[in-house]
Image: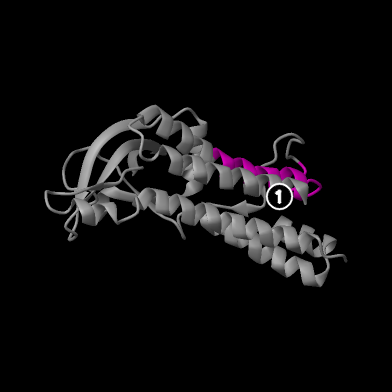
Amino acid sequence: MEVLDYCIEDIKYRIETCQAVDKENNFNKKVSEFRAFIFSIGSSMDIIRNNIFEDYKKNDSQPAKSKYFSDIYSIKEGKIHDEFDKYSNDKYADQQKQRIRTTVENLGKILSNGKYPFPAKKNHSLGPMFKGEEEVKEFGLWDIYNSLKHSCYPLESHFVLFTKDIIGEKHEMLLYIFDGDDKYYLPIWGGWVAPEGAEEYAKGKENPFIKLIKTIGNDIIDNLKTLNEILTIKK
């Protein structure tokens, strides 16, 4: 389907633009490309809702112009809505409906914090990052999407996290996410910081954040391709 082809190509492009700006020393450009990548994913999910499953109604009270992917899959509950199950059972042939369900579930898991958790810290401090589980909450892509969508602009960060490896991982941005009345800080983007003598070792390692963007983006693309294939099957 043409609309899914558009979503696939858009996400591919956003992965490439994030890679392109990674080596630049330009905070605002990196924020812009990261936002564009997240919005590409979020809008693609809503495009699926509004174009592929346009005639699906979650309930009678839902406004005609307010349709979102969350009508199909509850990120909070981690499952497909019962109304969508009934809709797909009534509309699609047996060979289609189970594969549609599986693919939608896959997309929902990618958006939740189940498959790709992003740990955020409640206290914005320069102490050891993510020490003390009581201070940490894991968010998902959909949380990041909603945070950025509601004008939460990342803060510049110069934090470095050292683990058992010889090199450290730097975080260039802090995105704040509200969870009720609580405010969490999520470190995003970054690369490697190497002590003297380990520069070549660091150069040989891919930026972990760019690697994650590629992994997530390609995971979604694979599922969009599968959905495209399913929907071309005739009843």
Q: Position of residue 58 (x, y in %)?
A: 73, 48
Is residue 132 something that shows in the picture? no
Spot occupied by residue 25 in the image (x, y as percentages of width and height): 32, 32
Q: Nearer the viewer, residue 166 or 174?
A: 166
Colouring: one colour
Residue at 80% in and 71% down: 94
Q: Please name the residue shown 18% across and 39% down the image.
A: 126
Residue visible at 45% across and 40% down in the picture: 20
Question: Main SS of the magenta segment?
Answer: helix
For the C terminus, give its image quadrant: bottom right
Q: Is residue 24 above or below residue 92?
A: above
- Whether residue 11 sits left or right of residue 132 in the image: it is right
User: On screen, 115 above or below 142?
Assistant: below
Q: Secondary structure at mark 1?
A: helix
The part of the chain drawn in magenta is: 39-60
Say which quarter of the image contains residue 61: top right
Q: Residue at x 30, y 37 (%)?
A: 172
- For label 1, count other residues whose C-alpha is less than 10 Å away and answer few (under 14), some (14-19) or many (20+): many
Of all residues, the one furthest to the front in this rendering is 200
Q: Seen in the image, is 118 located left or right of residue 216? A: left
Residue 225, visible in the rendered structure:
yes
Residue 85 on image: x %, y %: 72, 61
The residue labelled by disc 1 is 4
- Could you say which is closer to the camera, residue 168 or residue 187? 168
- The answer to whether 62 appears left or right of 198 in the picture is right
Q: Which residue extends farthest right? A: 235
- Provide residue 115's location: percent of width, then percent of height: 47, 60
Q: Is residue 57 magenta?
A: yes
Instruction: Give the amino acid type for the residue marked by disc 1 in the picture.
Output: Leu
Q: Is residue 163 above or below residue 32?
A: below
* Residue 210 within the segment the image draws in magenta: no
